[in-house]
Amino acid sequence: MWVGPPHFFKKGRLLVLYTGGNAGVLKALSSVLGPQFAGKQAEVTPARPRAVEQPLVYNPRRTFTTVKQNLRCRRMMNIRMKAWAALAAVVLPIMVTSHAAGEGGVPARGGSVVVAISSDPGGLNPAVTTQGGVHLVCGSIFSGLVAHDFQLNPVPDLAESWDVSPDAKVYTFRLAPGALFHDGEPVTSEDVRFTFEEMLLKFHSRTRASIGVNLRRVLTPDRHTVVFEFERPYAAFLQLADVTNAPVMPKHLYEGTDPLANPHNTKPVGSGPFKFQEWLKGDHITLTRNERYFKPGKPYLERVVYRVMPSASAAAIAFEKGEVDYFLNPTPLDVARLKDLPGVVVTDKGREGFATVETLIPNLARAPLSDPRVRRAMAHAIDKDFLVDKVLFGMGAPATGPISRLLAWAYNPNVEAYANDTALAERLLDEAGHVRGADGVRFRLKFVHASSYSKVAEAVRDQLREVGIAVELQQMEFGAAVESVYVRKDFDLAFASFENGPDPDIGVKRTVVSTNIGPIPFSNGAGYRNPRVDELFARAASELDRQKRASLYFEAQDILARDIAYFWLYEPKTAAAYKAGLRGMYEWSAKSNVYFSQDAWWADGGRGAEESNSLKRRGIYTLLAVLLLASVAGGAFLLLRRRRGGV
């Protein structure tokens, strides 16, 4: 096989001459070289047998000198042919790799993904908060012991394997031996123990509420084994120990410091697929590939950029213009439009591990909301169907209590319901002693909310106005709203997206048990207390039989609905949109928006690939040019010898 010198490169075509070469190789060369040369298919043309390839036959009319010259000429031409063969051997694999990468389902490396997020996270320490915006970014930086598939079954993450004692009181995890933090320090069992004892059990509302009073101790028999011993059986620990509820933090960077003020909260060091690069507040967060990630071959992307875009409409426009590749939680109107766009995937998968219930929080420590008669009247004044139809455009369902329908085994559909009835609401308020004043107002409430909840806040305000309750909306930046509600308790009403998690003990318990009242974000913000509810959740956590657990949760939901501990408004049906060229996005994880980065790759090269491909092409063309020049020089040498020696 021989690849022609420069004068064969005409009209964007490459001429390949062969004399009985491997046909399969030639077809591959033709298909691969085609896109590299102006997008035109290369010509693969049989060559006439070259004289130099014919057997050398003795001719008595030629002198010995002539035969010697022929032999020398033949050697020189063979050298040139071998040089071109070497060129093909070097260039062909490069081009085949370049052409085939990303095709046939084989993940390709390179490129970046830009993700639109609605707000700046308050910090980047996922062990001290349950704020969704923090975990959205930190899921790419940190690792948990396990992750969860679509069916909420645990799958390995930092823990390669685990054992659970028959009584569910002892959990033993074996860590991946090659796991490193981004600064090169190994991840050990001591990091796991430190994370639980010094951060999660003190500051993380879900983990603290779930196991804080039950976890006896954490043992570290060796560097790669960690053992959790519980006082009582604990059924949900494998559902808890993921990157959102139990991220493993670096002990060597946090020990002896205040975990709420540690400088690494804004320059995090984790063990996940991506490393922190920069954070420009209010604009973007950039992560780069962790080349020493403990999962071989992953990640495939070079960068992930989280772009702060508070306006959903602006994010949608940026997505359609190609400035954003991954758009989380588009509005219902945007979803309807994006579904019809070519090259766009819209999905509602990958949220099974969250099961969100959007909730109106009453401050039960303040009058008049401390009065259950007032809360009952307000429950009748709020029209949940209107909120679903007009605010969510049908993408959701009215909530009946704190447990989502997605956790079907634990969901009680038969709790007391409060149908929208403004006349009944007015009568109940009168009976509670809150009559209308001269201005028609019974009392005033301060409603604290983040900007992302402005539409539902306005709708609730308007509905309560109908029964004489004046609501003052106080829109704040997300972090400021969290501080006002959970820490300073300076509110009458507030709004929260309470995630159930993969088990009621993880996401629901923290919002209703009295042991979780305190200055902890996303905890029992209402300040609700009921000893029977505390008991039911404690018993359910230790019960191994799922049917018996369900009966305990059913009773708890009955009590919570009667007490109107919160106003559970609706369960949203959220979606995500991403470019069709992105693969590996929503293929296994029940929390895909957190775990996507370790598996995502561009099938069509994606963002940043054009520059990379251009560099590859320039390198290939440079190599071609060098070898072509060598070929020309060799040809010139032969021509000179011919003129001198009559070859």
Image (spheres, rainbow, N blue to C red):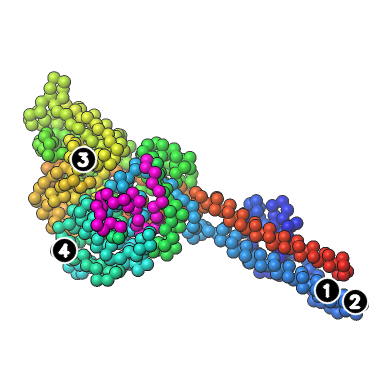
Q: Pick the residue in front: 267 or 618.
A: 267
Q: Main secondary structure of the magenta part?
A: loop
Horizontal side of residue 145 vs 205, given as left or right: right
The image shows residue 536 at horizontal and vertical percentages of: 12, 54
Q: Nearer the viewer, mark 2 or mark 4?
A: 4
- Provide the residue span drawn in magenta: 253-282
Residue at x 37% of width, y 54% of height: 140
Residue at label 4? 216
Question: Dot 3: within a 10 Å radius of its alpha carbon, few (fewer than 14), some, or many (20 or more) residues?
Answer: many
Task: Give the spatial CA distance, label 4 vs label 3.
Answer: 31 Å
What number is the disc on residue 70? Answer: 1
* First of labels 2, 4 by sequence position: 2
Residue 604 seen? no
Residue at label 2? 62
* First of labels 1, 2 by sequence position: 2
Vertical position of residue 613 compared to residue 364: above or below: below
Question: Dot 2: within a 10 Å radius of its alpha carbon, few (fewer than 14), some, or many (20 or more) residues?
Answer: few
Residue at label 3? 485
Q: Pick the residue in front: 317 or 45.
A: 317
Q: Residue furthest front?
A: 256
Residue 450 seen? yes
Question: Dot 1: within a 10 Å radius of its alpha carbon, few (fewer than 14), some, or many (20 or more) residues?
Answer: some
Task: Give the spatial CA distance, label 1 vs label 3.
Answer: 94 Å
